[in-house]
């Protein structure tokens, strides 16, 4: 494992990046809703997008723009998803790229476009035009906190992370920010996440590293089992550190360690800040025949409304957990199962262990709750991050547009 040191900030922690976040009137609240991230020099880039077949116009445009593995700017608006908006939505997404390109002096195809918010409503382009111009004027090497605030919707707080990775006697920095609180069960990433690095790394090396980190982090987050129309995870690499990342080298392994650290912390923040959540829940499945099977069982447990409501009520109703594992579609032997919740052993060899319910319930009244299920069938593990379902989850989603 490489020496990875946490830093303050996020996408502006690596050299040569500026960011900003401004209010353009897209959100009814008047809160910041337009963000820019711009590199001082051209970047290699990579991204992964939603697998939802009903995907938003910005996703389609950004896929086109990233075909050559190059980008230099990211423009984001919150409050309107520009999804299910037809040809006008496509024109608006392209216009966002054009406006950003003109404001920061790059080619429109160097702009990644992202939107988040309510689905099916026309984009208020007059507000966006003003917001993009204002955001470009306010770009700053210290503007990442403002950008992180501008991309959120139902999130209760911004989500940021940055690290530096020591590679021999040189330093590479990786920073990231994300948003997401509900409609989180991606098969690729999160709702929106943006990473930057000053490493020198080619697109054909960068993308596999991003996909590998995603598979272990953002692909292991679920809040409610819903996959967004707008999910985008993008990374810009501008090479300003002068440290070249070549596959199969210690530098490559160190870079991947740093990237995994940033993605892990952001993924945990997504689950921790799930809509109405009161606790981060870590579901670890051990002893599976394959990592894919371990992940499938962990996700099934994490998505179970009965499990999630029991967690909110601090109810050690462990039968719900084993039930979810049993209908996950993965073959298992009930007589081999071992389960603990909050560090309290509840099941061993498929049979209940006598426990004090009051003690077990008290152990669940924590901000971070571990669930560990051992299948005792193999050597593979997986961890999925989720949260509980509270009364507020229903309230937030029942009143989302009204």
Image: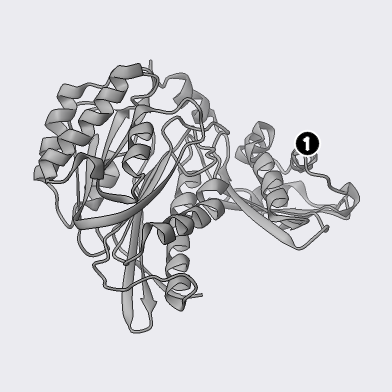
State the image coordinates of residue 5 (x, y, percent, origin top left). 38, 72
Instruction: Residue under label 1, please give it.
Output: 327
Category of crowding for the residue at label 1, using alpha-carbon neighbours closer than 10 angstroms: few (below 14), some (14–19), many (at least 20): few
Residue 129, relative to residue 375: is it above or below? above
Nearer to the camera, 181 or 74: 74
State the image coordinates of residue 13 (x, y, percent, origin top left). 27, 62
State the image coordinates of residue 267 (x, y, percent, origin top left). 48, 50
Q: Residue furthest bottom?
A: 169
The quarter of the picture where the C terminus appears is: top left
Report the side of 95 relative to 293 (left or right): left
Residue at image coords 35%, 54%: 176
Disc 1 secondary structure class: loop
Q: Quadrant of residue 23?
A: top left
Nearer to the camera, 9 or 363: 9
Q: Residue furthest top?
A: 402
Residue at image coords 56%, 55%: 216
């Amino acid at each position: 494992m490489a020496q990875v040191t946490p830093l303050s900030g996020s996408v502006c922690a690596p050299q040569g990046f500026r960011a900003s976040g401004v209010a353009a009137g897209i959100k009814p609240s008047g809160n910041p809703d337009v963000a820019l991230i711009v590199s001082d020099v051209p970047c290699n880039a990579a991204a992964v997008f939603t697998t939802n077949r009903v995907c938003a116009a910005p996703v389609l445009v950004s896929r086109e723009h990233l075909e050559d593995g190059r980008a230099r700017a990211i423009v984001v608006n919150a409050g309107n998803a520009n999804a299910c908006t037809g040809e006008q939505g496509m024109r608006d997404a392209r216009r966002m790229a054009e406006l950003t390109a003109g404001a920061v002096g790059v080619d429109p195809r160097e702009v990644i476009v992202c939107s988040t918010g309510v689905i099916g409503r026309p984009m208020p382009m007059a507000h966006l035009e003003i917001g993009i111009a204002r955001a470009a004027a306010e770009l700053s090497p210290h503007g990442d906190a403002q950008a992180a605030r501008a991309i959120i919707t139902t999130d209760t707080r911004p989500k940021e992370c940055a690290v530096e990775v020591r590679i021999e006697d040189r330093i590479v920095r990786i920073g990231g920010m994300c948003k997401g609180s509900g409609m989180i069960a991606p098969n690729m990433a999160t709702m929106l996440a943006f990473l930057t690095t000053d490493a020198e790394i080619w697109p054909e090396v960068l993308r596999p590293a991003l996909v590998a980190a995603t598979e272990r982090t953002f692909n292991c987050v679920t809040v409610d089992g819903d996959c967004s129309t707008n999910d985008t995870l993008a990374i810009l690499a501008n090479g300003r550190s002068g440290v070249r990342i070549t596959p199969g080298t210690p530098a490559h392994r160190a870079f991947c360690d740093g990237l995994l650290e940033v993605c892990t912390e952001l993924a945990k923040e997504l689950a921790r800040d799930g809509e109405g959540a009161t606790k981060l829940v870590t579901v670890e499945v051990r002893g599976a025949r394959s990592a894919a099977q371990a992940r499938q069982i962990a996700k099934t447990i994490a998505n179970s409304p009965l499990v999630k409501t029991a967690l909110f009520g601090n109810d050690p109703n462990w039968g719900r957990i084993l039930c979810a594992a049993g209908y996950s579609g993965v073959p298992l032997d009930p007589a081999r199962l071992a389960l603990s919740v909050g560090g309290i052993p509840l099941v061993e060899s498929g049979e209940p262990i006598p426990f004090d319910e009051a003690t077990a319930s008290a152990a669940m009244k924590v901000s971070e709750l571990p669930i560990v299920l051992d299948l005792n069938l193999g050597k593979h593990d997986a961890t999925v991050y989720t949260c509980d379902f509270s009364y507020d989850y229903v309230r937030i989603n029942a009143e989302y547009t009204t």
